[in-house]
Amino acid sequence: MTLSHDVLIVGGGGAGLRAAIAVAEDDPRLTVAIVSKVYPMRSHTVSAEGGAAAVIRPDDSLDEHAYDTISGGDWLCAQDAVEVFVKEAPEELLRLEHWGCPWSREPDGRVAVRPFGGMKRMRTWFAADKTGFHLLHTLFQTSLRYERIARYDEWYVTRLLVDDGRVAGVVAVELMSGRIEAITAKAVILCTGGCGQIYPFTTNAAIKTGDGMGLAYRAGAPLKDMEFVQYHPTGLPFTGILITEAARAEGGWLINKDGYRYLQDYDLGTPSPTPVLRSMELGPRDRLSQAFVQEVEKGRTVDTPYGPIVHLDLRHLGETVIDARLPFVRELCRSYENIDPVRELIPVRPVVHYMMGGVHTDIYGSTPLEGLFAAGEVACVSINGANRLGSNSLPELLVFGARAGRAAASFASGVQGAGTSVRPAVRAQVEDERRRLERDLLQRDGGKEPISAIREEMRATMEEGAGIYRSGSSLAKAADRLSVLQERFRSVRLEDRSRTFNTELLAALELSFMLDVAESIVHCALRREESRGAHQRVDFPARDDHRFLANSLVYRDADGSRRVEYPPVTITRWPPGERVYGR
Amino acid sequence: MADRIILRVTRYRPESDTEPTTQEHEIPLRKEWSVLDGLNHIKDHLDGTLSYRWSCRMGVCGSCGMTVNGEPKLTCATFLGDYAPGPVRVEPLSNFPVVRDLVVDIGDFMRKLPRVKPWLIRSEQEPPAAGEYPQLPAEREEYEQFSMCINCMLCYAACPVYALDEEFLGPAAIALAQRYNLDSRDQGASERTDVLSAAEGIWACTFVGECSAVCPKDVDPAGAIQRYKFTAAMDSLKALLLPRGAR
Amino acid sequence: MKTEHTPFHPRWYRPRVPVFWWLRRRSYLLFVLRELSSVFVAWFVVFLLLLVNAVAQGPEDYRRFLDWSATPGMLLLNVVALCFILLHAVTWLFTLSPHAMVVRLRGRRLPPAAIGAGNLVAWMLASALAAFLILG
């Protein structure tokens, strides 16, 4: 049996579903399918809370949204991409509204907006504080009306097939049966999201293991700006559950152990009782997370069994506002911390949240590998530069999911023949992959390294070596430890021989992708000898536009060696300047 | 509080087993550990062959529904401390075929969902550039509760009607249909009538109410179904009594 | 893929529903009892029709009907039937209809408990009226 589609989408979250709908609407003759390792409504888009930014108010402008995004990204954003993004974001959010997304409303029935970190105007649309949940379910339910969108639910893609420099499909395992199949396609869109699971403490779901980044990297497509890892300033200790930035946008305060709003000490403005845009608690995430580390060093944080914390104070907002605007925050605090934010302080600490970097694409979602596209967190266009602004990621996955879908559709229409006959080179890759999965992993005896041990050590390595602050020596040490872990992974131990829903095999394959992605992060971070946005080098504390107003592109060559290139950042109308918040 | 607790976990391997068995593990008991943390401890340190689904561990992705001490629960939001001194029984969700260990097949729900047309239906689709369809906060509130469903399947596991009759559309699917029926922007209620008013639709429900009792998101599917019964009954009555034009 | 089945699909474990499943939970038991109550609702209808028939036939038949109704077996049956009818009525008034009906007062939706309370008041008034007509 040959499974074959014109366009194959890997990942069924927000970007993947939006891309699938775009393909289905673009050209009814094309066949399109989504391969996802979980049912689409389980995808991690579901966890996004705060909102989605797009210019809608008359007092706002596209240029202001672009400027906030570019300065927030410390001038590493591709400015042509940002211009496209801010222009198309309102239309995408309106389309979601037309598909039924329950956006919160103003009393007169218009869509409501709220302030958000690093944004100079109110432009963040929201559905209470479950924006990602509603967005994902709206997209998934809307996708059901297109019978032509085929789905491979709970299939795991292990490898991209490449034929003579062009993507030819994927090899995937069906979890239910364990069968390994090639699914051929004229175009493949990666929409697999981020890789927070390579760190010990993350808001990311268990499924966020960098699969798509690993797939592309191994197939020869470059990863871009991998050293930029966003720490969200407010995660719950132990679980890492996200407390949305909307909590601060609605007026929440960050206070240290003395009850002092410490952000005023870090060039983020002066405290005022009500929130001021681009100031204090509404500063950008990188600066807030860095301020936390400084507070720890000054001994002004609270020690807990799960490390130092500060407090998020929502008490002055009152029960009515919290229940109307932040019901999920209250629910999460009650369930997971046994506290009520109406009356008590919420313990928080920075937590790994988002990858600014990812598979290098242009503004059409197209990667340098012919026929391969990417959109959403797995991709790096880059509109996020060195630091993403809160509420830009949801519109990003819509805008670029749709763009990648349309581009892949037109690419697939242009590809002649192909399809049914599988070329020998591709067949050899399929056999090769089958052998790797069956013989090297499933039936292998004598492995001695437990998956969880390698995984835990990788996470500790990343936190110590490539955390909020890094140095040349911490990164070099991390690089060494990761290559040892890669070696240890070769003798990983698998006890589960079953074909049916073998989650141990899945964990091993995910770990292998994570190790590759972790190495790309550490090596890019080591080479970038400056501090910019989320990449803070203690040995190079200043931004260096002379050497590094450039994206890092890391390639893995066929022999396994790494190569990093630095093409200059695309600048259109906003020359690099100082990032100013609160003054 | 003792510092250890026993987890009794259902195992089932279709290749070799004819029916499920129970495996016992003693694990650390920590006050912030959920049942899911306990399962992860088993998988990472005691027995790597245990299979179960999980993802967000914040009660919103809907993956980790299982039966805990006889009750359908999201294991990420159910805490070991509440079951001390134990033991805690962890079984797959009821009313679904067991694929392996704690993994059940929800394909039946996935096939039923599109049948209720859970998407916004408009007689005429306007382009996004025309702006949003206005909706007052009170109109949004009308369907908000039913839009909170995370498809975790706890309601199907609790429903005795579904246990006895696999054809029953089920609580979550009907609640989602109602979510769109009650949305002021939707114009497709009549397109959903046939499926909802069929014998295996709302009328199969006998108002046990367990679906609403176990729902982790307070969706109240039982309420949604009874409301639709009322609507459907009134519609039939109108069709019977009123002349065609006045309906 | 929608219709594909795994090689082990036939071996997925499908537990049988046990015969006494309805004893597992209070709500299941109540549900089965409520289903059973329909038999007794039907019985009350039959009983009422018999009564009407007896009245129509004249005083002789009516007295015979009353004597028959007073036999211990009939009393027991009707007491049991009354209990089931009450269960049925209570479900309808206080659990089902408050959830099924949406009543708005000045634009705000009434909570289910308020509708239940309204039903209770209506029930009491109807009973008082009936008592007044019969006794008064």
Image: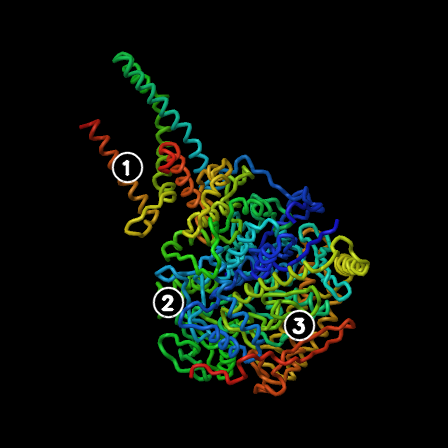
Name the amino acid, label 3. Leu
Label 3: which secondary element: strand
Q: In the image, what residue occupies the spot 55% across and 80% down? A: A75
Check disc 2 and report the residue beneath it. Answer: A343
Give the alpha-carbon distance from disc 3 to disc 1, as whole Å: 72 Å
Q: Tell me which label, 2 or 3, sits earlier in the chain.
A: 3
C42 lies left or right of A145: left
Please name whichever residue, A70 or C125, is drawn nearer the observer in this view of the structure: A70
Check disc 1 and report the residue beneath it. Answer: C123
Check disc 3 and report the residue beneath it. Answer: A223
Give the alpha-carbon distance from disc 1 to disc 2, as whole Å: 43 Å
Please name whichever residue, A168 or B113, is drawn nearer the observer in this view of the structure: A168
Label 1: which secondary element: helix
Label 2: which secondary element: loop
Q: Chain of mark 3?
A: A
Label 1: how many Cα within 10 Å (few below 14, some 14–19, many 20+): few
Dividing the picture into quarters, in which one does residue B63 lie? bottom right
Q: Chain of mark 2?
A: A
Name the amino acid, label 2. Arg
Q: Position of residue C74 (x, y in %)?
A: 36, 21
